[in-house]
Amino acid sequence: MKRNRCSTPYAASLLLVALLAGCSKKEEPAATPAPNPVQAATPAVQPAAAVQKPLSSAAGRGASTLDFRRRTDPFKPYAPAVAAPPAGAGAPQARVRSTEDLLPIQTFEVGKFKVAGIIAGLTENRALLIDPAGKGYVVQQGMLIGNNDGRITRITASSVEVVENFREDTGRIRKRKIVLTLAKKR
């Protein structure tokens, strides 16, 4: 029993020494080859090196023929970067919409609305639209609808026309016309 107690610290210290010896930070420098003496006395005739033919025709091509100037950048964010206006500028600033200012009818995409009914009036028509959540809205011409600032341009006896202004990836402002039709009776 006494022998076991003495051999355990010795074994641990030997193991520690072996580990530390293998982890030394000193590196031995590699042996540098001796410089070859220059032979300038007699030039020897060297045989011409054999040139291997290229294995593929792709290696023979020069510069790339692809043109990426007209392609869109896949890493460019869709949301435009908003530059901070200079301090003290008296110019009017564009109004930034926040979710607190939006009506519930302006939080859904226009294509998700369903036309439940159209009311033909003497002066103007009105329509009953149902949003995806099931809530109904009575709308008229000129009202804002949808999350892309769509405006109702026309209400006919069978449809509601909405025009959305949106900015493309290239920065151009485009108009999109969406027609919501009244469901046919069964």
Image (tube, helix red, strand yellow):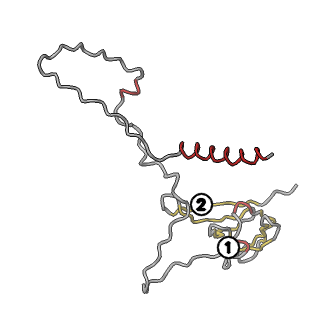
Q: Secondary structure at mark 1?
A: loop
Q: Depth check: 167 or 69 in front?
A: 69
Q: Is residue 56 above or below residue 141?
A: above
| Location of residue 127 by image quarter | bottom right
Extreme front residue here? 2
Residue 86 drawn at (x, y percent): 42, 80
Q: Is residue 34 above or below residue 184?
A: above
> Is 130 on the left or on the right of 145, as rendered?
right
Q: Quadrant of the C terminus?
A: bottom right
Residue at 13% across, 16% down: 42
> Is 129 on the left or on the right of 18, as rendered?
right
> Is 151 on the left or on the right of 66, as rendered?
right
Residue at 53% across, 63% down: 167
Q: Depth check: 46 or 170 in front?
A: 46
Of the residues under marks 2 and 1, which one precedes in the sequence?
A: 1
3D distance between C-alphas at marks 2 and 1: 17 Å
Residue at 69% across, 71% down: 106
| Location of residue 150 by image quarter | bottom right
Extreme left residue here? 41
Residue at 55% across, 60% down: 78
Q: Depth check: 68 or 164 in front?
A: 68
Q: Amino acid at mark 1?
A: Gln
Which residue is identified by label 2?
176
Which residue is identified by label 1?
141
